[in-house]
Image: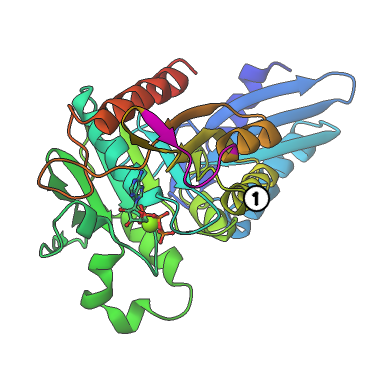
Amino acid sequence: MTTKQINKYIENIIDPSRNQSLGALQAIKHLGIDPEKNTVILLIEVGKKNPDVTNQLTRELAKIVKIDLGFAGLVVDYEQSRPEHLGKKVKILGIASGKGGVGKSTVTANLAYALTRLGKKVGILDADIYGANMPKILDCENRILESNADGKVTPITVDGIEMVSTEYMVDTDRALLWRGPMLGKVLKIFFDDTLWSPELEYLLVDLPPGTGDVMMDLRQFVADIKLLLVTTPHPSASHIAIKAGFAAKSLQQELLGVIENMSWLEIDNHRHKVFGEGGGEAVSEKLLVPLLGQIPLGQPTGENPSIFSETDKIGIIYLSLAKTIMRLVENA
Ligand SMILES: Nc1ncnc2c1ncn2[C@@H]1O[C@H](COP(=O)(O)OP(=O)(O)OP(=O)(O)O)[C@@H](O)[C@H]1O
Ligand SMILES: [Mg+2]
């Protein structure tokens, strides 16, 4: 029996999370046969990777493969599909740190501007439940997230950057959201029910401080999120960033690299290491990922006190960081 023939038998099975057949969904990502063990090996993409869905599919697949077709074994792995409104080409980057206050949100926003200046269409998802401040950073706090009759949300757009934030959810539905598995509900709206531009190329997810719990929630929506770890040069920050990195690794989450923020303060061409040094390097060495860039301390010269302009020294550093990241993810 060939893989083509097996495909014919299993392509009519319905993914219960999407109510369409595996064939129509092009959900059979890999189909192989291990002749020695007389076993069929499958990788199936599902709309929702939860036990209800995968157990039902495994039962139906095992019935066909083992009972109808007579194979001795079946090995099946599942992967989470992309949300409907996020095309396959969108690169999803999570900005994490472990320790709070090291500059995740500032880096997220400035990276979004730098990527935009390099011609990319960028979105920001502010997933920091308790400390959401992207509306403040992008200076659009007075706006509201609009939803249409189907409950689909249109992101806010600032300088061509699309953005959704948990901050907008609090006032509209405080009672619903501030209890129970709140993050999951908000993430569902932001991933499944937000009308991101079809042109979107990068989605930057500003994560809350912490070492992994949010990642578990995120993975139910996007499996292939890549992480950028932000640290300061000080061991107190790098120590926790390393922990966060190992937590992510244990979840098989891809770590793209490390960004060291607040690396020095330059006065009269002299770099003062006010927060010490070596944090970025330490994280990079421990986790075996590259140190992608170092961002000094400084304030923007433009109107927005958080966003560096293209001509600010630090704005230029962000452009170079964005180019490094583009090379990494686009040549992968
Ligand atoms: N390179 C820098 N130079 C000067 N100030 C900075 C720099 N990076 C960040 N800051 C400032 O440090 C503070 C914390 O930054 P930010 O809010 O981006 O950190 P965070 O890691 O997102 O914090 P939280 O963990 O609370 O989400 C802000 O006031 C920000 O303006
Ligand atoms: Mg933040």
- The amino acid sitting under disc 1 is His
Instruction: Report the side of 268 relative to 277 (left or right).
Output: left
Whole-percent x, y for residue 95 in the image? 44, 45
Whole-percent x, y for residue 29 in the image? 56, 28
Residue 170 visible in the current orientation: yes
312 above or below 221? above
Whole-percent x, y for residue 280 in the image? 56, 37
Identify the residue shown where x is 48% and y is 40%: 273
Q: Quadrant of residue 10?
A: top right
Q: Quadrant of residue 122?
A: top left
Query: Front-most of 313 and 115?
Result: 313
Query: Front-most of 69 and 23?
Result: 23
253 above or below 320? below
The local secondary structure at tag 1 comes to helix
Residue 84 visible in the current orientation: no
Identify the residue shown where x is 64% and y is 37%: 282
Q: Is mark 1 within 8 Å of ligand 1?
A: no
Instruction: Report the side of 48 relative to 330 (left or right).
Output: right
Q: Which residues are magenta?
A: 270-278
Q: Where does label 1 land, which residue?
A: 239
